[in-house]
Image (tube, rainbow, N blue to C red):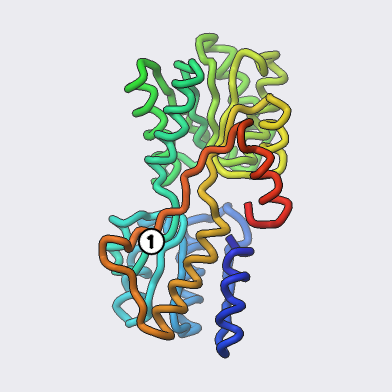
Amino acid sequence: MKRGADDAAKALEANGGSLRWLTIPNYDNFGPDLATLLQTAISQKPAAIAAIDPEPGAEDSLLKQISSSGIPLILVNSGGLAEVQKVGAIYYVGSDNVAAGKLAGDYLVQQGIKDVLCVNTIPGTPLTEERCDGIKAAETAGGGTSTELPLPASNFGNPTAIAQAIKAAVLKNTSINGVVTLDEPDADSAASALQQANLTDKVKLGSFDIDAAGLARIKAGTQLFVVDQEPYMQGYLAVSLAYQYVKFGLLLPASERAVLTGPVLVTKDNVQQAIAGAAAGAR
């Protein structure tokens, strides 16, 4: 996402503008840290703000403050059109997480995978719940089932603990023939868990979001797919749309205010193209 934003910022810089990129240090205090980040952004009085919104309870009051102050606001990556309307943003740029979950679930059904474990390491967060819900809806429609494995917050970022939890779950329920994680670091843990349980061939692995390890597993045949939300496009389009609005007053019609990037499925059929995109820093 930052690479996309930085590329779009070249147009700003060529016209005397600039981009400031603010980020939290880690996920240990996710919601409150995001709220603090928004307060920092507001205090800098920028011409526009693009922000993620994975924690509406912690962020919404500040997002509404941004909009009501007259600073154009673009939501990126999380929130969707409903949240745009709720907080007064001018755009949502990102993936539809329910649609992304359904895309994954439909592909699993097509591959004959009818008993899925959806591993959620941030339970209660709307975007992760929506992804698991989408998988469940697709599996149910296809005659299968999907069960969510919610893990405690203390496990987040702990690959050993996540791997052990997944290993225990697939050994306990031997009917599971698919595991889906909601981000790529957790896919690394799931791959380790399946290898430890000697189930790599029997239980197929899928994930959301791209990293080099996941693409390598798809190429090698040990991972079935990833669902890409195309974050490069999210960063590029958010900065571009903000610049066009601030500089020229340009705005897409109301029906087009949700600018969707993905979801796109990466499988063995198109993994080489994704690998090339990752090598270029755009995937």
Given residues 276 and 140, the one toward you in this image is: 276
Is residue 163 found left or right of 229 in the rendered image? right
Q: Amino acid at mark 1?
A: Tyr
Q: Which residue is mark 1?
A: 92
Question: Taking 59 as reference, is 277 left or right?
Answer: right
Q: Is residue 56 left or right of residue 114?
A: left
Location of the N terminus by quadrant is: bottom right
**Which residue is depicted at the point 43% across and 60% down?**
93
* Residue neighbourhood size for the residue with mark 1, other residues' Cα within 10 Å, grouped as few (<14), some (14–19), many (≥20): many
Residue 12 x %, y %: 55, 82
Residue 153 visible from this viewpoint: no
> Picture coordinates of residue 24 (x, y %)?
58, 63
Of residues 277 and 139, the one drawn nearer to the viewer in this rendering = 277
Rendered location of residue 141, percent (x, y): 32, 22
Residue at 33% x, 63% y: name it: 257
Image position of 182 (left or right of 249)? right
Res. 167 in view: yes
Count of labels shown? 1
